[in-house]
Image (tube, rainbow, N blue to C red):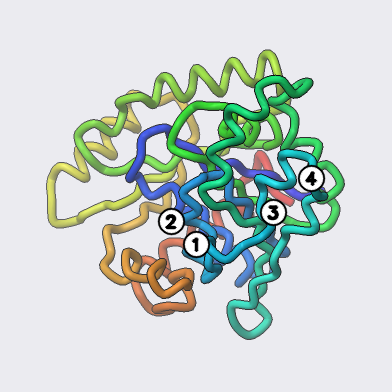
Amino acid sequence: MGRIIAVANQKGGVGKTTTSINLAACLAEKGKKVLAIDMDPQGNLTSGLGINKNDLDLTIYNAMCNEINIGECTIVRPLGHKLDISVVPANRELAGAEVELINVEKPQHILKKLIKNLRSKYDFIIIDCPPALGMLTINSMTAADTVLVPIQCEFFALDGLSQLIYTIGLIKKQLNKSLEIEGVVFTMYDSRTNLSLEVVENVKNNLDQFIYSTIIPRNVRLAESPSFGLPINLYDSRSSGAQAYRELASEVINNKLFAI
């Protein structure tokens, strides 16, 4: 059975989508069969994997509204030699789902039902959540086994994190009893500043959660790669960003709590 990981943080600009894209690509590079689901109406995961979100007729929105099955909007994105990722894309239409699905029976469980039969087809299903704790994020966490939380190495790193952990706890209690926190990963680390080091130490001292040892650096090539529609391991395979996400993928695979 595949492992479903929701990548979430209600604070924007922390490297959430960058982590979703590059973790998925590096897992695929290691021979894992991967499905990436874009649950953010901004559609950045979609465009970051080279799919034109504005030209799509079918997206996760259509599946969420019960117009199609999820397979009809799934795109297999060939990214290189023996490196394919299946993608369920999104665009701005998905923003309407927050309102339109309110009156649907058990609206928090829609995504879970959609991907129920996909677990056996993939080793990992990576869900990129929007930067808000609304219905789309709740759907993602209700469907997931674990939540991976990217934290930017900045002064306000812990701001809002307690609210996110509280929300995860509520979802675990009321909607998804098996939900666990996959772990925390530090992003945008700048080794030239004392602040980044201080933030890492502060979070480690104040957070009672598993923290991945891989730290994602602030890297120009990593920032450039989405504009070319490529994950970092294909855009610049030798960059520090590519190496970091390969290490994170290895850690995720070998996590003793969830190893497959």
Pointer 1: what residue?
Answer: 22
Q: Cα distance, mark 1 to mark 4?
A: 30 Å
Q: Identify the residue shown where x is 73% and y is 39%.
A: 65
Q: Position of residue 78 (x, y in %)?
A: 64, 77
- In which image quadrant can residue 227 be found? bottom left
Q: What type is the residue that disc 1 sits on? A: Asn
Q: What type is the residue that disc 4 sits on? A: Glu
- 10 Å neighbourhood of mark 3: few (<14), some, or many (≥20)? many
Q: Cα distance, mark 2 to mark 4?
A: 30 Å
Nearest the viewer among 112 and 206 is 112
First of labels 2, 4 by sequence position: 2
Q: Position of residue 210 (x, y in %)?
A: 49, 35
Left or right: 233 as drawn, with respect to 72:
left
Q: Residues at badges 2 and 1 in contact (C-beta under 8 Å)?
A: yes
Pointer 2: what residue?
Answer: 18
Q: Identify the residue shown where x is 42% and y is 53%.
A: 214
Nearest the viewer among 6 and 250 is 6
Q: What type is the residue that disc 3 sits on? A: Phe
* Nearer mark to the viewer, of 1 and 4: 4
Q: Cα distance, mark 3 to mark 4?
A: 25 Å
Left or right: 114 as drawn, with respect to 19:
right
Pointer 3: what residue?
Answer: 124
First of labels 1, 4 by sequence position: 1
Left or right: 95 as drawn, with respect to 162:
right
Pointer 4: what residue?
Answer: 67
First of labels 3, 1 by sequence position: 1
Q: Position of residue 126 (x, y in %)?
A: 62, 50
What number is the disc on residue 108?
A: none
